[in-house]
Image (tube, grey):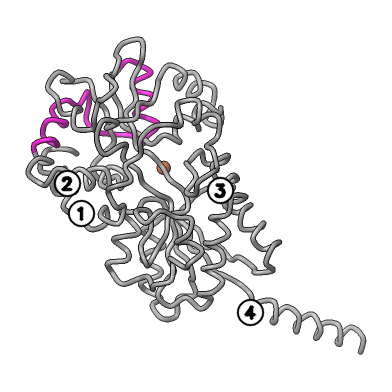
Amino acid sequence: MKKLVLSILGLLFISTSVMAQEVNIFSARHYDSDVQLYKKFTAKTGIKVNIVSGKDKALQKRIKEEGKDCKGDLYITADAGRLGAFQSQGMFQKGASSAGIKKVVPANFRSAYWTGIAKRARVIYYNPKTVNPSWNMTYEDLADPKYKGRVVIRQSNNVYNQSLVASLIKNNGAKNTETWAKGLVSNFARKAKGNDRAQILAVAAGEADWAVANTYYIALMLSGKKGPEQQAAAKKVKPFFPNQDGRGTHMNISGGGILKHAPNKANAIKLLEFLLTPEAQKHIVNNTFEYSMIDGVEPNKLISQFGLGFKQDLKTKVSSYGKLQAKALKIMTEAGWN
Ligand SMILES: [Fe+2]
């Protein structure tokens, strides 16, 4: 009996001292592969990773409501617009650009409050049997009346679209973007609906010639993970990287920021730095089909087959997306983009 009590006390002691080494993640990324990555981090560092996963709105609400009592250290999500908007509400603290992070993440993909951990490109899809984009086709061209009734894109409430439109405002100004949005809406093949994959499917089915969606979705469909029908449809469609003659293709990020009341800030920085190692980046690109945030890690073959040498927009800071998100949504809804 005495022995048992002693060993329980011993276990309690060990577990409380281990518990001190932890990091709490609030994640809106819905990938099982992220969890595997956190396990690798724990194996390497001994730092336990606790994950609260959920949808962005719910997580953000919880973080705000809990205030100082929030145990979250890191908020991880997709889209720079989301990170930027949350930052503007004062929910992050500085620290996400440690020397280690600055060294590997280009300046346009991070701020003092958050950093990208993977890149995504939002591109144009087409059916090569029916249309052929000219090499210098742009997002701006999608508003050209010659594409009347031939374009599909998801709704204006989608944050990826809001970030894309924010980048247009940043580069072309609000007035030009208003005109563009009206032109685009009048080219819609149908009311905006569905997710990114639904746009690719619409092109495969001949409902439209042009769609806008992120690159990783076609890889996901081609991988067979979304079933044989979507796999077959994806084979009929090709991604096109727009704006090659100008600023480059619109880039966005998955990223993470250190929460204002983070109890384990140092561990949160360590985790971000780990996510940016070649080992972790390889794991990410091969599971989510995003692009690596750091140099020297090639995308998965399902993505690299479409070309590696495309020009990315490295000029437009992704931190501008959050700042212009509300303006973007206003322009979109006023143009009749449902
Ligand atoms: Fe997505």
Question: Does the beta carbon of the residue at mark 3 sit less than 8 Å from ligand 1?
Answer: no
Coordinates of residue 199 in the picture (x, y in percent): 34, 29
Q: Which mark is residue 259?
A: none
Does the image show residue 208? no
Q: Amino acid at mark 4?
A: Ala
Q: CA distance from mark 3 to mark 2?
A: 31 Å
Q: Which mark is residue 20?
A: 4
Q: CA distance from mark 2 to mark 4?
A: 46 Å
The earlier-in-sequence mark between 3 and 2 is 2
Q: CA distance from mark 1 to mark 3?
A: 29 Å
Residue at 29%, 13% in the rendered image: 131
> CB under 8 Å between callouts 2 and 1?
yes
Instruction: Provide the secondary structure element on which disc 4 rests.
Output: loop
Q: Residues within 10 Å of mark 4 (few under 14, many from 20)?
A: few
Disc 2: which residue = 169
> CB under 8 Å between callouts 3 and 2?
no
Q: Amino acid at mark 3?
A: Gln
Residue stretch rendered in magenta on the structure: 179-206
Disc 3: which residue = 281
Q: Residues within 10 Å of mark 3 (few under 14, many from 20)?
A: many
The verdict on residue 197 being magenta is yes
Q: CA distance from mark 2 to mark 1?
A: 8 Å
Examine the rendered structure and indicate whether residue 29 appears above or below residue 249.
below
Instruction: Provide the secondary structure element on which disc 3 rests.
Output: helix
The earlier-in-sequence mark between 1 and 3 is 3
Q: Is residue 148 left or right of residue 296?
A: left
Question: Does the beta carbon of the residue at mark 4 sit less than 8 Å from ligand 1?
Answer: no
Ligand 1 is in which quadrant of the figure?
Answer: top left
* Disc 2 versus disc 4: nearer the observer: 2
Coordinates of residue 138 in the picture (x, y in percent): 24, 30
Disc 1: which residue = 324
Q: Amino acid at mark 1?
A: Leu
